[in-house]
Image: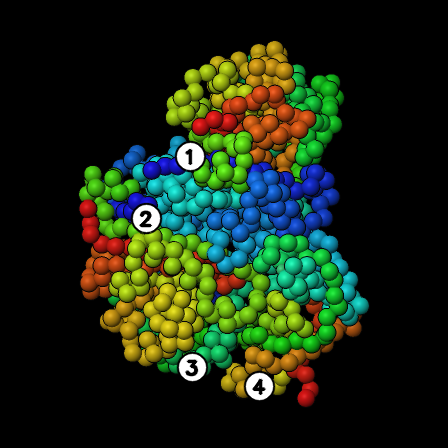
Amino acid sequence: MSKVAIAGHGTYGFGSDTNGRSDTEMVLEASMAALESADLSHEEVDSIIYTGQDAYDGSAISDGQRVSAAGGYRKPFMRIQNGGGAAIHQAVSKINSGKADVVSIVAADSVYADPRVLSWTSHEALYHRTMGQNNDQSFGLLATAHQQERGVSDETLAQVAEKNYRAAANNDVAHRQEAYSVEDVLEADRVVGPLTELMLRPNSFGAAVCVLVSESFAEERGNARSWITGTGLATGKYWYRDMSGRLEQPTLQQAASTAFEEADVTIDDVDAAEIAAYSPTLEMTSYEAIGLCAEGESSSLIEDGVTAPDGSFPVNLSGGPLATSPPNAGGIYRAIAASQVIEGDLGDGSAERVLLADNDMHLGEPGRTDAVMVLEGGAA
Amino acid sequence: MSRDVAVVGVGYSEPESFTDYRFSTQSKEEQAFTAVTNALDHADIDADDVDATMFCTVDGFEGTFRVERTLEVLGLGNDVPVLSVNTGGTAGGSGVKVAHEYIASGKYDVAVVYGSPSFDSVVEAQPVMNTNADPLFERNFVTAIQMGALPSSGYMEISGATEEDFAEVAAKNYRAGARNPYAHRNEERTVEEILDSPMVCWPLRRAMTCPVSSGSAAMVVVSEDIATDVRDNPVWIDEIDSTSNTFWTGYRTYDWFPKLKELSDQVYENADIDDPLEEFDVAETFNPYIPFEMMEYEALGFCEKGEAKHLVRDGVTDRDGELPVNMSGGTLCTNSGICASLSRHSEVVLQLMGEAGDRQVEGAKKGLSHSWGANLGQFHQMAIFSTER
Amino acid sequence: MADELDPSVQTDAINAEYKYPFHWDLDFSLNIGEDNRKFFEGMEEKRILGKKCPDCGATFVPPQAVCVECYVETDEWVEVEQHGVVESYTACFFEFEGLPEPPYITAAIRVADSDICMLHFIDGIEYEDHDELVEKLHKGTEVEPVWADEREGHIRDIKHWEPVEK
Ligand SMILES: [Zn+2]
């Protein structure tokens, strides 16, 4: 499989408001910034993939509304609803199939609605919605299991959040840019189980666009910012069977092992990661799923600061979803952040290989889809 | 490095499930399992060998946002990705396109494309459909029926096509639907009966517009090695593509489908098609409002612009004509939401396999499928299938 | 970027002239299928039914039409014991339409020897704060259903589950 380059990217935001901009205006601004950073004209884009979703956009077939601003007029326009990571996974195959050389991946978040209620409408109607199942409740169920089965303290969970906010304080596009302390996190309002407001995502508004190009195109134009050398994708089961199994995050394991195999690397060859972890429990158990440590050992990585911004394997130099979480555009933004880690715009610039683990768990953990990518430096 | 890609299995939910959506009693899980199992059986491929599933939908209709997350029968465990594809009315074709790219690229070998019966849990389809229009301006004035009527009346003006021509095309579809066990409307209707049906929105009469149906479809798409391994008559995807128009409909001329013309020119160039009327043996086009079928003849190059009335009057697209079109009865007879978009493709595949039952066109070797969707036909998608590589 | 707003602030209170509020009020009616219909009939009679996989023998409460491990349709109905074991739980501290006053406890409960868990409420536990709750409720806590007096073929025909008195 040929590698594919991230040639350009652009964002608008992120924040708790769109700053008075419409969806179209934000998409246009982010798209133009992305094309400029890739040194491409909009005529050169072969195909568009949109990752917004009907319920978040407040209209059925909402992808149609973004066609013009995304540069999709008279071009193929696809929508993948499993998030930015899955869209990139599809774009890589689109390019490798010979169907396109330049693909732009686009999303924006501009419509205000209660994300917890939207998540609730995504759960099974007869048995789960009747019990109020939604994103936060699913994170609470996992967090309880995590604490009871692995003996993880509230303080450790708070440390995970604090580490993300410390990173976000140095990221000028993050939504939450305040370096909240462990005490701040523990004293914030309790939402569900052990999880407080600051252990869960904000609802962010803004837009993100990422432009992918084929290897030959990138070599000809010299516009590669980073290379995608391996991708993996897996979807999990919806019904609860056993929580220990869910703590192992089998779909993340599966997607990561496929991506590593394709890139012909192991976790030891990777220097940093951007992980779509929607709670401290999910971040800690992700370390185990990607093989950064053995099962149950993630607490010590946190205690030792291994995954902190100045640690030996920084996770979420962007601040992750706890700092910035636009539900439509989050995956694209995380891919941009992973590329920025390689480009040296996030962190100390030493990372040569970064793991991107995205998913659509903004809707909750059951039935999740995980998309994992290995990004490498070595610009063409 | 691109590989050839073939379709080796088609499966539908039970014939009885292709009915008025209000009669539907099966759960989404039950319908999905039936269609997917039938497709896998038809392909002679084991569920364990599936690498990925494309779930094709319009989310707003499902009653559960991202409903595929809750349908474990599509995911088959923790290792098979379920891609959620939503591009409005073209979503079934988009799913085939995504599957094609994954397999051509070498990423996957076996993909299942599933077309959801997306209307099956709405109480009224129209209010959901209306959330598709622009909320600030257009939502206040148009509904889906106007989206069908506006280009239809404009087309009459520029082409000289008559109400009788529309009724003739509709009658052809009803005759075809009567031969299709998976058609919702499966009784013949005469030109007179069609012209006697109530006027809904000029020039569309009730019998010229589609019903709201239930029923689901699945297709198995595989790599070249597997295709020749599992069956003698795989159907190859020669070419597949799509294009997009603006969302705001103010740019439209409301009289035919110029964007489809652009797309078909491109697709024919890539696939070396010089004379589509002669080279295709069957075609399935998206005709929820019957005048669309005539506009599509022109945009797909079966005739010159404005000349479709002659194809209709001469029976060129009827069963015994040069290019039989919509021998399934089309979307006019069965509109089970996104399933209808996938069915355009699966019906051409069955024709080329020689397994289309009473609706079979003898000796069909090359076929065309088309789907249309989103705000006033913002998206067009088409594919060319062939018995030979 | 912008400061974090208090969640209670309504969006239309800010830059109202840039907002166009609309309400998405759509009616849906789900086809529940044969299996759920039968399960709910059982609920009305205070019976809990499960459905079994013919291949691996797994029992599913609530019923599943298909065993995804074996990819076959389940076929045999069994009435299961009205006894559950907590797999995990969480207390919700936020208000949610149609649900009890917070905090309320939602749990994943394995009913009898079901392969999958049922989500339901747990009540009948006195606790002052979260720490005390965590002391009293565990993975493995045994629970039993408390039935509603008026039942209408719905998962909430069970009002909630309570720890079994030892
Ligand atoms: Zn089984």
Distance from disc 2 to disc 1, alpha carbons, whole Å, reads 29 Å
Label 1: few (<14), some or many (≥20) within 10 Å?
many
What is the three-letter code of the residue carrying label 1? Answer: Asp
| Residue beneath disc 2 | A210
Q: Nearer the viewer, mark 2 or mark 1?
A: 1
Q: Chain of mark 3?
A: A
Between the C-alphas of marks 3 and 4, the distance is 17 Å
Q: Residue at x 36, y 81 (%)?
A: A183
Q: Secondary structure at mark 2?
A: strand
Q: Amino acid at mark 4?
A: Lys
Q: The residue marked by circle 4 belongs to what chain?
A: C
User: Which one is nearer the viewer's eye here, C78 or B129?
Assistant: C78
Along the viewing direction, whichever of A205 and B216 lies nearer the viewer? B216
Same chain for mark 4 and mark 1? The answer is no
Q: Choose mark 4 or mark 1, whichever is in front.
A: 1
For marks 3 and 2 on the same chain, the one whose residue lies earlier in the sequence: 3
In the picture of the structure, the residue carrying the numbered disc 1 is B4
**Do marks 3 and 2 both belong to one polypeptide chain?**
yes
Q: CA distance from mark 4 to mark 1?
A: 61 Å
Measure the alpha-carbon separation of dots 3 and 1.
54 Å
Secondary structure beneath label 4? helix
Q: Position of residue A215 (x, y in %)?
A: 26, 43
Q: CA distance from mark 3 to mark 2?
A: 38 Å
Residue at image position (70%, 73%) is C159
The quarter of the picture where residue A13 lies is: bottom left
What amino acid type is highlighted by mark number 2? Answer: Cys
Which residue position holds label 3?
A153
Judging depth in this view, the residue of B388 and B374 nearest the camera is B388
Q: Determine which residue is flagged by label 4.
A: C136
**Badge 3 and badge 1 in a common chain:** no
The type of residue carrying mark 3 is Ser
